[in-house]
Amino acid sequence: MANIDGGHYFLTTLIPVLADAVRRADGSFTVPSHLLREALASLPTAQQSPASVAAGFYSPFSRCTRSHFVRAVVIDQPMYNGRDGGNALVQALRKVNLLAVQPVDNLSRPWLMFNADFDARSDEADGGLASWAAGLWTRTEPELRAVFEHCIGFDAVDSGAAFAAWLKRCQIETTMSFNDYYVPMPALDAYTLPQVGKGIAVATGVLTVLAAGVLLALQHSLGWLLLAAPLAAVLAVLGWLVVLWEKGSQPYPTGAGTDLPAVLKALHVQQRFALLAAELQGADARTVHARFGDFLRQVRPADITGPTQAPGVIRSDGVPLVAHQDVPVKEAAA
């Protein structure tokens, strides 16, 4: 499944935005894409700067402890990259008029691109998309309504299961994901060119014998037998291409410590250890030993439940520590 890699689900959706004019409370008119932009602009982002930390607001998506990244962008029109390039000599021979206007792609309406990277679930048929969407709905329904109410079809969404189904209809396949948490290269089946060649040769021989036997059994002429080997070779090559394609389409296995709670715990330990290292510069061995023991007792590196960095923040120092209590969602099984 191309949407899943390394234990993460990479969701990509393109959602059509409403186009009819909307009357504001003051009597003025606007378009849904403007209201959508206002709703997105009003959403708090992750606390990644002193200004956002001082504001005291948290991203609503941080309430779901499976979400690593979420991004929403309004697309009005595709970017124009200039004329389609070509060989200058060929264009000259064909007398191509470089001043003639080429066809340009246009969108009939604005679209909302909604992307998310969250922890996949290998025990669920859809990789965990429905349970993630239902959990997100349960925790952030007001914010989701404020954003998606400007999109086509959202007026029928009234539950987490309905929200998951609506997102699924807008989903497009993610063919090139970006995974921030790759672990060391797993043991993968590798095929060298000699191995592929031997496999094709063996398959060709087997298919040739079978084809020859079938043709002889049907009492065909010798001319037909001469076609058996080339035909068998073509079939063998196609078979190997199918095998290699299937192997290459398999996602990387889930890496240890790459789900969101583990990543937050690792960030917390890393930052607290850096503070400890700065504190102990020039200290004697006895002090270092004592303070490191305090560090282990306070930080508890092996305890993933806490203390840990809170989701939605970039630093754990000066931020209240939390314990992960991801409340099960009843609609997750829907």
Image (cartoon, helix red, strand yellow):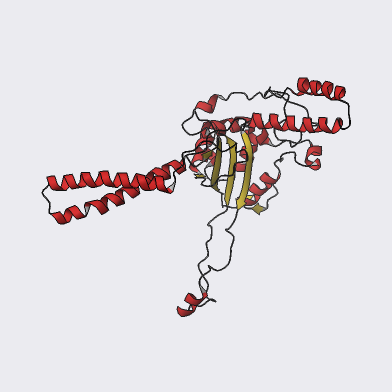
Tag count in the figure?
0
Residue at the spot 58% in from the left edge and 48% down from the top edge: 112
Q: Is residue 101 left or right of residue 180?
A: left
Q: Which residue is nearer to you in this view: 27 or 295?
A: 295
Q: Residue at x 46, y 31 (%)?
A: 125
- Residue 42 to residue 19: above or below: above
Task: Tell me, yes or no, if residue 239 can be seen here.
Answer: no
The one of 258 and 71 positioned closer to us in this rendering: 258
Q: Please determine whether, in this image, residue 214 is positioned above or below residue 308.
A: below
**On the rendered structure, is 263 left or right of 177?**
right
Q: Is residue 172 or residue 218 the one in the foreground? A: 218
Look at the image and tell me whether residue 48 can be seen.
yes
Q: Residue furthest left?
A: 219
**Residue in view at x 86 percent, y 30 percent:** 280
From the viewer's perspective, tell me whether residue 25 is left or right of residue 274: left
Residue 334 position, x and y percent, is 49, 28
Image coords of residue 198 (percent x, y): 36, 45
Q: Nearer the viewer, residue 100 or 225?
A: 225
- Coordinates of residue 88 in the picture (x, y in percent): 52, 75
Please state the horizontal and vertical placement of residue 177, each as a whole percent of the image.
56, 44
From the viewer's perspective, tell me whether residue 265 is left or right of residue 127: right
